[in-house]
Amino acid sequence: MSDEGLGLDVCSAGELELAVAAGFPADRIVLHGNAKTPHDLERALGYGVGRIVIDSPSEIARIAAAVGPDGHQSVMVRVVPGISAGGQDKIRTGTDDRKFGLSISDGSAQHAIARILDQPQLELTGLHCHLGSQISGVKSYLAAVRRMVGLMARLKEQHGLVLRELDLGGGHGIAYRPGEPAIDLPRLARKVRAELTEACAAAGLTVPRLLVEPGRAVVGPAGVALYRVVSVKRTGGRTFVAVDGGMSDNPRPALYGVRYAPRPVGRRGSTDTASVTVVGRHCEAGDVLAPDARLPADVRAGDLIAVPVAGAYQLSMASGYNAVGRPPVVAVRDGRARLLVRRESWEDIRSRDVGL
């Protein structure tokens, strides 16, 4: 990411520490989060992150006090534009009934901005919004541009404030299975830039620097999860293919019904296929990776199964359920492999339990 000149979002002191340890420039890091702890803010200010996105009025005084009267910190405000978008209800974040951001409709965002302007050590560089995840269309982003520019115009009128940045968040949809919709990124870019230029011209505003957060769209397709089949069981009219992982390394199917398309790798199987349910090894009926996968009819224990589009919101959400241990991460390029994150070992698990 650093080599490509991109910025980086972090949502905790832990993510920030990883970024800094990798040598990522702190001034290109943005700290997000609806419940930033004192430790999160302390580390962010200590490293000198480029932006802190304020998500709650209480953060304003806390950040100002931590910066001190002679300090300086650039901030943005996460605004709720009142637009519902996203592939599933649990990943829609742009309306007033969600935990994120400050509402335009009830004046919360405007009140927070006025408070920030009273803190000379805080510099409000722009506004931020995020509508949701897995958005496959363009219209919701265009609506967000119009509402955010409308707010920027009112701020200029009321406070003489000219904001130089507008962050539209991300949520760009990707296809997890063949035939699923994915957002057309070049079209999104053209439409959003045109809408922003037109809206700013109508409002008499200088066009701000446009920021987007394409995280999933970048790293999601880059990852493939590999599982080994542990058992194949035919019972009750169904075939269950159980693998050596599951919801401890990918809780997304259990959380909000994400569906994947597993594929066999590493051996020639039968040309005949069968509909199977690929399940994990954990003590939950909901530990299902793919309920309707097509795999070779002769799939058997020891086979390898690949699950594409596993680079985002999978291992990052992994848990210690059943003490199975989290899998390694391996980079592969031109037939060569390099270990990036080692497998979690029994010693790792045991060493944290100081009662043993």
Image (cartoon, helix red, strand yellow):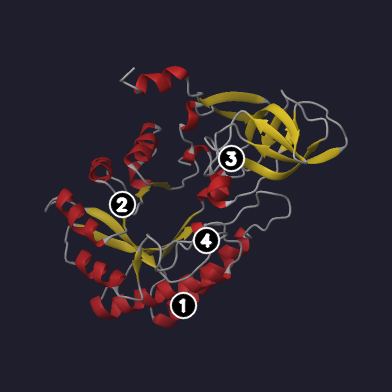
Disc 3 from disc 4: Cα separation: 20 Å
SS at mark 1 in the image: helix
Q: Earlier in the sequence, mark 1 or mark 2?
A: 2
The Cα–Cα distance between marks 4 and 2, rounded to whole angstroms, is 21 Å
Q: Residue furthest front?
A: 236
Above-or-below relation of 157 to 348? below
Asked if the residues shown at circle 3 and circle 2 are in contact, with their CB atoms under 8 angstroms apart, the answer is no
N-terminal label among 3 and 2: 2
Left or right position of 121 against 292: left
- The local secondary structure at tag 4 comes to helix
CA gap, disc 1 and disc 3: 47 Å
Image location (x, y in percent) of residue 270: 86, 32
- Residue receiving disc 1: 199
Which of the 4 quarters of the picture holds residue 338? top right
Judged from the image, the secondary structure of the residue bearing numbered disc 2 is loop
Residue 297 screen position, x and y as percent: 83, 34
- Which residue is the site of mark 4? 89
Q: CA distance from mark 1 to mark 2?
A: 33 Å
Three-letter amino acid code of the residue under disc 1? Ala
Residues 78 and 149: in front is 78
User: In the image, what residue occupies the spot 72% across and 24% down?
Assistant: 301
The amino acid beneath tag 4 is Asp
Question: Residue 96 at x, y = what percent?
Answer: 39, 69
Alpha-carbon span between mark 3 and mark 2: 29 Å
Q: Residues within 10 Å of mark 4 (few under 14, many from 20)?
A: few
The label shown at residue 287 is 3
First in sequence: mark 1 or mark 3?
1
